[in-house]
Image (tube, coloured by chain):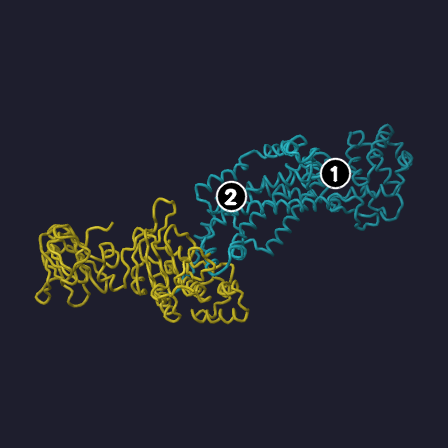
Chain colours: A cyan, B yellow
Amino acid sequence: MPAHLSIKEIADSQAQLRRKKLVLFAFTLPLLLFVMLAFVAPIATMLYRSVYHPTVAQLIPQTLKQMQGWETQSNTLPDNDSLVTFALELKSLAAERRSGKLAEEINRVFPGASSLIKSTARKLKRLDEQEIISSQGTILLDSHKKWHNPALWRAIASAGEVWTSRYYLTALDLQLSPEGDIESRDTRIYLKLYWKSLRIALLITLLTAVLAFPLSYFLANASSAKANTLLVFVLLPFWTSLLVRTTSWIALLQTNGVVNSTLKVLGIIDQPLELLYTEFATVISMTHILLPFMVLPLYSVMKNIDPSYFRAALSLGAKPLPAFAKIYFPMTLPGLSAGALLVFIISIGYYITPALVGGTDGQMISNIIAFHMQSSNNWELAAALGSLLLVLILALYWLYDRMVGVNNIKLG
Amino acid sequence: MPPAVDNSCYVQFKNVKKSYDQRTLVVVDFTLDIAKGEFVTLLGPSGSGKTTCLMMLAGFEDVSSGEILVEGQPITHIAPYHRNIGMVFQHYALFPHMTVEENLAYPLKVRKLPDTEVKRRVADSLDLVELSNFGKRYPGHLSGGQRQRVALARSLIFEPSIVLMDEPLGALDKNLREQMQFEIKRLHEQLGFTAIYVTHDQTEALTMSDRIAVFDQGVVQQCASPDQLYERPSNAFVADFIGENNHLAGTVLQRNNDYTELQLSDGSRVKALTGDCPEAGAACVLAVRPENLFIASDKVALDNRINATFITQLYVGDFIRYFFQLEDKSEIMIKQLNDHQAPKLSAGAVTSLTWSVNDGLALNLSTT
């Protein structure tokens, strides 16, 4: 007998293997579909939306086409044909009651354009088409002196771009200069907010680690009956609604809340402290809410550390503290880093708690994203901000992998 | 001036008691003197208190009552890291985030030895356990036997005078275990430390130790050299725990210091060495090792003789076990070398078994 498989045997066993894999894959199919629909698709849409913006191009397609010949750098106005086409399109938009949308879009690129476009649209609506064509654009230019500004026309042209990096630039506090260079904006909002979110997330991670480490150590070394009872208290916040927990912090921290009145009664303060609606409120309530995410991985790792390691260190002559630092602590790192990663990533994109207790001071990047989604109706900017947050988290994860190694993580 | 120390009392346990819950005693009145350089094994079934004794000596458990002395000095109030006692743990307890070299250097570094000295001693130590090429590896990349040798080397590198070993070979397979038993013995003879070894494996205890303390239920049943323990067990528990033994119920007829005459439950009268058996007229038990029992024939006829019916046999390889039933239905087993003299018996065959007076031991029924 030959010592290897025949070609037919190899083919058969491969077919068998394939069948097995297919069956296994079929089991994961429902989840895969769900994830595609509920997770991958929205993220893809978000990324797409942050660079694809056809609204203006759909509102004034003819004008944008006409303006293609126009030298944007030339500091002159577009030619008369473009002006006439724009006036005609604006008139028909006004008739369809869609000129407001155009005004809003242009206003984002050129602040102040909103009222100009709206008032001009009202005027054009009353005019006859022939009148507009024969006027060679003077009607438009005469309606307001702002129409003589080439910057406004550049803004219209740039708003009309279907594919745009504008929202990413805005999200990074940058803009395109009239010359087409990238320059920084006068007001810096978003970078500051990113930095603040990063700082708050790091602070919360540090605080939860400092609080959770001794607790987990105690739990891991307590008798199992005691540990189980205490673990219920750790998990209790998980079972309580997030809103209830956050609201209870409002009750604690408000001007006449529990903390202030206690301090007053004890005579430590005369005037109530400003605790609620500050960064402090955001940090302390998020630390409380995210603590279990640190305790659980730490506990499960500490639980599995054989006490004989520590004993071995002692028997080898190390004093308790150095033995703890050099032997025990390094063994808890997988749990500590898992907890830190969880808490950090959850907190950097946290929304509800800063929104409720943060005031203006304790807002994080998610709150401004929500603002652009709900109030300013600038979904493209929200998408760009969200995508940048995603990139930031992925970059930090990569950094973490380089420094600590993701394989070292132990979630239990 | 410390009190003069007799080398035969290097380590002393004096009436040591241990209780975890202040009610039940895990260790009941443990007293033992260990000589310098001696290899003493604490042997017993799990939960018999032997590991607890070791942990009290190492300083990881408090002593509830009594004293432990080393070189005549009580050590109960000395912190474990000042006791200078080497310890090998059951699962090695090698620090997984340190290489073999770093593991070995750790006890020297905490003692603030100069770097050159640390390097030299780590190299020597690796040589000693024949692992010179493994210094840069992590414990996770070593085999069980190699880890065991590193653990051993680490417990010896700071030259402790006492080394404690808590079932160090429990996690190894049989062949490796025998190899490591030899290795530990070699190091013990070469370095001359005092070893206290805990195991539940009697073969390991018998082959390695100078003396063995047999534990049961927190009490030392007997502490003696391996041959003494095997040949003259002081009670029925030791007789049964060390090696195999047949226990035959009987009654004492007559007893003197050396020999006891007794009547077995099948009615036959036999003579045996006097163990801890009671006064004449009381119930007792006769212990006879299976290898000391023979099937009587023209050539083999010893002092004691009883009738037995053959039931079955078990073929083991180097020997064969024969199972017999006595007239009172109690069972007895004999062990015979698998040589050309091994008899062939058919089921139900009636024969008689014989043994020497000096191979039977009359013991008390139970130990409490």
Query: Residue, x 83% and y 33% (percent of image)?
Result: A115
Residue B287 in the image, given as x and y percentages of width and height: 18, 57
Marks 1/2 same chain = yes
Q: Which mark is residue B244?
A: none
The foreground one among B308 and A112 is B308
Q: Is residue B224 left or right of residue A379?
A: left
Q: CA gap, disc 1 to disc 2?
A: 37 Å
Residue A331 in the image, given as x and y percentages of width and height: 51, 54
Q: Quadrant of residue B150?
A: bottom left
**Residue under pointer 2:** A29
Residue A258 in the image, given as x and y percentages of width and height: 62, 32
The foreground one among A101 and A2 is A101
Pick whichever of labels 1 and 2 is earlier in the sequence.
2
Residue A251 in the image, given as x and y percentages of width and height: 63, 31
Q: Quadrant of residue A79?
A: top right
Residue A253 visible from this viewpoint: no
Q: Which mark is residue A55?
A: 1
Q: Quadrant of residue B80?
A: bottom left
The foreground one among A75 and A188 is A188
Q: Quadrant of the N terminus of chain B?
A: bottom left
Classify mark 1: residues with Cα within 10 Å, few (<14), some (14-19) or many (20+): some
Q: Is residue A218 left or right of residue B215?
A: right
The image shows residue B290, relative to residue A145, as above or below, that is below
The foreground one among B245 and A409 is B245
Single out the residue that lies furthest toward the top.
A126
Query: Residue, x 50% and y 49% (percent of image)?
Result: A301
Q: Amino acid at mark 1?
A: Thr
The secondary element bearing badge 1 is classed as helix
Q: Is residue A300 left or right of residue A399?
A: left
Kindly identify which chain the residue marked by label 1 belongs to. Answer: A
Residue A243 visible from this viewpoint: yes
The secondary element bearing badge 2 is classed as helix
